[in-house]
């Protein structure tokens, strides 16, 4: 019975007023149904890859990991000792692609880079 019916002694009954219906949706269930468990973006899981940059061709594989949503810890020591010019080209390619996709990139010490997709930011 509506509150005003208690105090007014009658009038409009509760069944006369339209009720608003709602459906409760569990967002977690619907997201899990659309993403496989092996996906790095699954609920509660964050994909972090540790990779090596041994030549320029490796940059395509690393960019694929970033596009799939993984954070990449990249060891550049192998290419740095082999060919500094090729390292600079590879790092520039990675940097341009990551910035274009709203990601971030930072050097750690002398032999490591951290590369992130758009959903993660590196605090400096």
Image (cartoon, rainbow, N blue to C red):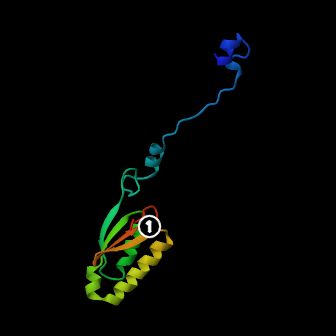
- Residue for badge 1: 67
Q: Which residue is found at the position 45% from the left and 47% from the top?
A: 33
Q: Quadrant of the N terminus?
A: top right
Determine crowd level at label 1: few under 14, some 14-19, many 20+ residues with C-alpha closer than 10 A. some
Of the pair 115 and 70, the residue shown nearer to us: 115
Question: Could you tell me residue 68's position as x and y percent?
Answer: 42, 64
Residue 78 sits in which quadrant?
Answer: bottom left
Q: Is residue 109 above or below residue 39?
A: below
**Relative to 54, is 64 on the left or the right?**
right
Of the pair 3 and 70, the residue shown nearer to us: 3
Q: Which residue is found at the position 39% from the left and 57% from the top?
A: 39
- Element type at mark 1: helix
Q: Which residue is found at the position 45% from the left and 44% from the top?
A: 28
**Relative to 44, is 4 on the left or the right?**
right
**Relative to 36, is 11 on the left or the right?**
right
Q: Is residue 45 above or below residue 99?
A: above
Question: Could you tell me residue 4's position as x and y percent?
Answer: 68, 17
Question: Could you tell me residue 84's position as x and y percent?
Answer: 32, 88
Residue 2 in sight in this render: no
Q: Is residue 88 above or below residue 97?
A: below
């Amino acid at each position: 019975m509506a509150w005003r019916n208690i105090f007014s002694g009658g009038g409009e009954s509760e069944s006369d007023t339209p009720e608003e219906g709602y459906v409760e949706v569990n967002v977690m269930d619907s997201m899990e149904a659309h993403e496989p468990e092996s996906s790095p973006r699954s609920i509660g899981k964050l994909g972090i890859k540790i990779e090596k940059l041994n030549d320029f061709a490796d940059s395509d594989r690393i960019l694929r990991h970033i596009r799939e949503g993984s954070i990449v810890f990249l060891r550049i020591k192998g290419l740095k000792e082999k060919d500094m010019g090729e390292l600079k080209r590879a790092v520039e390619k990675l940097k341009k692609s990551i910035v274009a996709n709203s990601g971030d990139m930072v050097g750690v010490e002398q032999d490591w880079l951290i590369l992130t997709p758009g959903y993660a930011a590196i605090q400096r």
